Image (cartoon, rainbow, N blue to C red):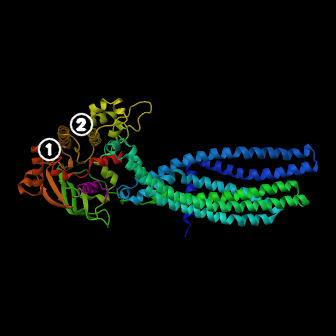
Amino acid sequence: MANPLLGRIRVAAALAWTAHPAAAVSAAVLGVLSGVAPVATAWLTKLVLDAIIRGDGFAALAPAAAGLAVAGLAVIVLPHLAEYAKAQLRRSLRVLIYDRLFRAVNRHPGLSRFETPGFHDTLRLAYDASGNAPDRLVIGVLAIGQAIITLAGFAASLAAINPLMIVVIALAALPTARVELMLSRKRAEVMWDITPAMRRQVFFGDLLTRPEAAKEVRLFGLGDYLRTRMLDEVRDINRAERDVDRRALRSQGAMALLGSAVAAGGLIWAIAGAASGDISVGDVTVFVAAVAGVQAALTAIVRHWADVHNALLMFGHYMEVVAAEPDLPVPREPVALPALRRGIELRDVWFRYSDEHPWILRGVDLFIPYGRTVALVGVNGAGKSTLVKLLCRMYDPSKGRITWDGVDLRDVNPADLRGRIGAVFQDYMDYDLTAAENIQLGDLSAGRDQVREAARRAGVHDTIAALPRGYDTMLSRLFGDRDEQSGVSLSGGQWQRLALARAYLRQRQDLLILDEPSSGLDAQAEHEVHTGLRAYRGERTSVLISHRLGTVRDADLIVVLSEGRIAERGTHDELMASDGEYARLFTLQAAGDETGSSGGAGDDGPAESLRTTTPSTRSAGR
């Protein structure tokens, strides 16, 4: 079986060559020259000293002196040139690595990986590794190659003077190599262990600094509590890192003492040999330089290999993400998705998020006719939002199938399917981008006129036009210009209208999904939004989710979900006549309206239990 670490080195080398071939070659050549230069300097120094002691004239000294000057210049200049080449390679490599990492992330068409903590830990480590592990690998291997060249040159020098010293130094280096590799593995293990704590640290720090959280943090006096929670995570991280550092201090300190003892013994032998006339002064110079050079080269090899080994372990997380198969199967030869003309059908659809989770949907049979509006209602956990995820093929049913004019959604390209779907979700995204960009994300091919028209439909054009820079205003206090207060924070209702404008921007969709499109709006704004949506829906096939039952009464079909099953279905009048769960909830909301509940839709009454998610989930996307 092939060594996985060697495989990762080959991958990193191929990435380096792809990223910047000229910089990779330059770094390698300069590394070779940098490895030769110290050995040449030592031998040229020996020749000059021996010639001086023999009393040779300047003419005899000139070639060696000139060579020494060139070698000395090379020792000074080559590291700077090599560092420049490595920096060029490092920057190009980082772009390529990030590109491939996020191409791999985007290759997952579903949500399952992104809703799994283990994947987040792997992805975080992969992201961290992308920033430094590949160039650590490449630069580390180049540094090892340079050290090997230096080692070979000085080892040959020692062999000519005292071969026994080579054996002694090599034996002294073996424990050092073992210690460094052990520390490398330990650091990689600790990094994996502390990743959840690092995520929690970022989470608590984010709550302390994000403007979206500032209001509640101050109102409820949460600042010290969150600060303490964050510091607890930092202390746990520090404790784990400190244990490794202490082990490194003990082990590396002992190895440094061993190396010093070997060097001291060799120096005493060389001085004694020169005093007895067995070796020349030049030999002493070469010997001292060779002992120091061999030790330095061995130390460099061991240290760089330990760093490369650690980088290889971390690089494994990157390769795991890049090599991962899509979380949803994408057909090799997808079926072309026809224009919707008959309808969408769910046949005996069952779904749960894993074998350990309970069933969310239980044998759902539902037909969504073309050109009609189907409303989904039910209490929290009834399965409404999960059903919408299946319609968008963010997940596949555990059992059963969903068809689009008879075509199974599993047989089509998810990107083609989603290109036919427009949606407004209650947990919509607020992007720290300009107002125009926030809308244009609904259809990146749309022009400025189309963006403005979508904003007008959503009733947010006048709000945007009044901003400091109109549609070019940054909708974020965090990313506005440093010299100007140009960043603006919108209200929740204004953000919701922006999300609605994103949906309006998509003109080619066959299916429109409206998941609580007016939650958080006042009664007048809600009326305006739903009036606009009715006109916009027109002949489009629509799925509407709302806890405010007054907004779904004109739907062609109302479906009541309960515990993952369809409990009732029919028009508003039919369901009211049947006097079931829908009639009970509608009556409760109507009674709340009559007694003066704020918001006009039973916001404070029993029907509030129909909410699917809380608006606060939006802050996670900011």
What kind of residue is marked 1?
A: Ser
Q: Is residue 581 left or right of residue 481?
A: left
Q: Quadrant of the C terminus?
A: top left
Q: Residue at x 75, y 56 (%)?
A: 292
Q: Which residue is mark 1?
A: 597
Tag 1, which secondary structure? loop
Would you say residue 328 is visible in this rendering? yes
Residue 86 placement (x, y as % from top left): 61, 47
Which mark is in front, 1 or 2?
Answer: 1
Would you say residue 322 is visible in this rendering? no
Q: Is residue 312 left or right of residue 65?
A: left
Residue 374 placement (x, y as % from top left): 17, 51
Q: Residue at x 77, y 45 (%)?
A: 72
Magenta span includes 139? no
Residue 347 placement (x, y as % from top left): 21, 62
Q: Which residues are magenta?
A: 382-395
Instruction: Assess whether mark 2 and mark 1 are in contact (beta carbons under 8 angstroms).
Output: no
Which numbered disc, 1 or 2, marks the residue that appears first in the sequence? 2
Q: Which residue is mark 2?
A: 457
Q: Residue 357 or 445: which is nearer the viewer? A: 357
What kind of residue is marked 2?
A: Arg
Q: Residue 251 or 93: which is nearer the viewer? A: 251
Q: How many C-alpha atoms fall within 10 Å of the one at disc 1: few (<14), some, or many (≥20)? A: some
Q: Is residue 212 left or right of residue 148?
A: left
